[in-house]
Amino acid sequence: MAEAAESPGDRGTASPRPLFAGLSDISISQDIPIEGEITIPMRSRNREFDSSTLNESVRNTIMRDLKAVGKKFMHVLYPRKSNTLLRDWDLWGPLILCVTLALMLQRGSVDSEKDGGPQFAEVFVILWFGAVTITLNSKLLGGNISFFQSLCVLGYCILPLTVAMLICRLVLLAEPGPVNFTVRLFVVIVMFAWSIAASTAFLADSQPPNRKALAVYPVFLFYFVISWMILTFTPQ
Amino acid sequence: MAAADELAFHEFEEATSLLAETPDAATTSRSGQLASPGHVAVAVGSGGTYGAEDDEEEGDKTALLQEEKPQPGFWTFSYYQRFFDVDTAQVLDRIKGSLLPRPGHNFVQHHLRNHPDLYGPFWICATLAFVLAVTGNLTLVLAQRRDPSIRYSPQFHKVTVAGITIYCYAWLVPLALWGFLRWRQGVRERVGPYSLLETVCVYGYSLFVFIPMVVLWLIPVPWLQWLFGALALALSTAGLVLTLWPVVREDTRLVAAALLSTVVLLHFLLAMGCKLYFFQPLPAEQVAPPAQVTSLTLHTHLPPTLARSVATP
């Protein structure tokens, strides 16, 4: 993009300029080319680059980020050996998923009894501190994955379980009975296996082979706890 | 020439006198070096069935290797990476060693081999805490099947209670034990105490046997539950006592007996507490238990759809 926003003054000079060549032009005023723009070429290049994202509409900015998040959702739903989640990591997806799951899992405010389901804060803390603990564990075991990449993968792989939560909520609107429970159990088990498969596909390669099981077991425990919370959810 | 011969003879005499002196100095410094890693001295003292010389050499070599590497500071990441330097096979071997304690084999010496880790204790405690909460909740499901007036609830606060209890037990009790053993170090000459990490490891791995015990407590037969509890407790405390016995043996009999009985008692209290708090007694068939009547009187007025909303297969 920097090359596309080149000032017209530079096109007059046929030779390609090295990167910081403009800096030497700043100090001596008579060396600044007077054709084209009077402003210094280096700075004007930067200003046009900034304004290209500053001036775009809010819709474009949001859509760009949403498309990146959506692309990663697709990579989780159809796990292949690709590096997209690791290369362009972001934490928007995990945040959206975590907030959605915690909002759906919390018990209602009118419920005052002691033993109910988890509160919003409890789910949120379990999700984020669980992910941080697993990441630290993986790094301490000697994995070559960065901290935020691992958080990103673990957060995005909650997507199947969030879908399971949505389905369970819909199923709970129907007639309660053993069929109800069996359907929910089946959905949760399938999505749990999907989450583990997706996260293992991304995370297992970062560990040496004699420690893979040590790194994968906490992921299994993490998703198991989330699945348990989803399965035992009772609407008030 | 005679002078040179005399000089040579003198040197030889001095050399022999020096050699006569140095063996003592060498042995005292060597034994001093051996006493610092405590488990190696334990090998010499217990006179185990395996070759004590091999362990001495191994301990010597590992002690030298450790002294060569500069210790990183506790604020660096690599300091904590040393405690996670285990392979899958090693962790599984340590778990097997804690499940089947044998009288000749000291867990610290035989399985840890001067290489304690934090992975096992941390994740065994986490697994135990979650398994306790989940199976405790499952017994409520089973109770509801027998007595439909019991209302099912996820009881999420039990996860918090379980986590705090297990982690405090598995980390504070070894800390207290380690402190006590170091305080009594003056009484024993030969045997040094275990390091803090080794004590935490011993306790952490000894808690592993509680995980299958808790899962088997789902079977709603009371005498079977007590049997499993007793079996698991026996295995776990046997492992602890066998590990602590070589260290405590040289102390006075009173202190040794008091320490071992405290360790056993605390372990017993943990198992008892888990059983009583997380596993409510199942109601008899078609009879509501009196203990839950007071909590149920509030719920019997709720519309029946709420009680039916959680269906069991």
Image (cartoon, coloured by chain):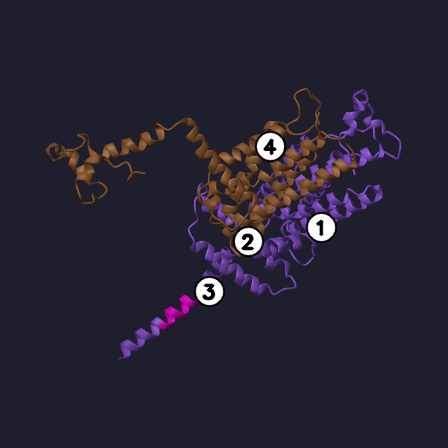
Chain colours: A brown, B purple
Query: Residue B23 has which mark?
Result: 3
x 32%, y 29%: residue: A51
Q: Subunit of mark 4?
A: A
x 50%, y 55%: residue: B32
Nearer the observer, B254 or A22? A22
- Mark 3 to mark 1: distance in Å? 42 Å
Q: Position of residue B175 (x, y in %)?
A: 59, 40
| Residue under label 4 | A101
Task: Kindly state the secondary structure of the residue where label 1 is placed.
Answer: helix
| Residue under label 2 | A211
- The stretch of residues the image draws in magenta is B12-24
Task: Kindly state the secondary structure of the residue where label 4 is placed.
Answer: helix
Kindly indicate whether the residue at mark 4 contacts the one at mark 2 (C-beta within 8 angstroms): no
Q: Quadrant of the N terminus of chain B?
A: bottom left
Task: Compare marks 2 and 4 and give the one earlier in the sequence.
Answer: 4
Callout 2 and callout 3 share a chain:
no
- Mark 2 to mark 1: distance in Å? 30 Å
Above or below for B12 versus B88: below
- Mark 4 to mark 3: distance in Å? 72 Å
- Mark whose residue sits in front, 4 or 3: 4
Q: Subunit of mark 3?
A: B
- Mark 2 to mark 4: distance in Å? 31 Å
Q: Position of residue B133 (x, y in %)?
A: 69, 37
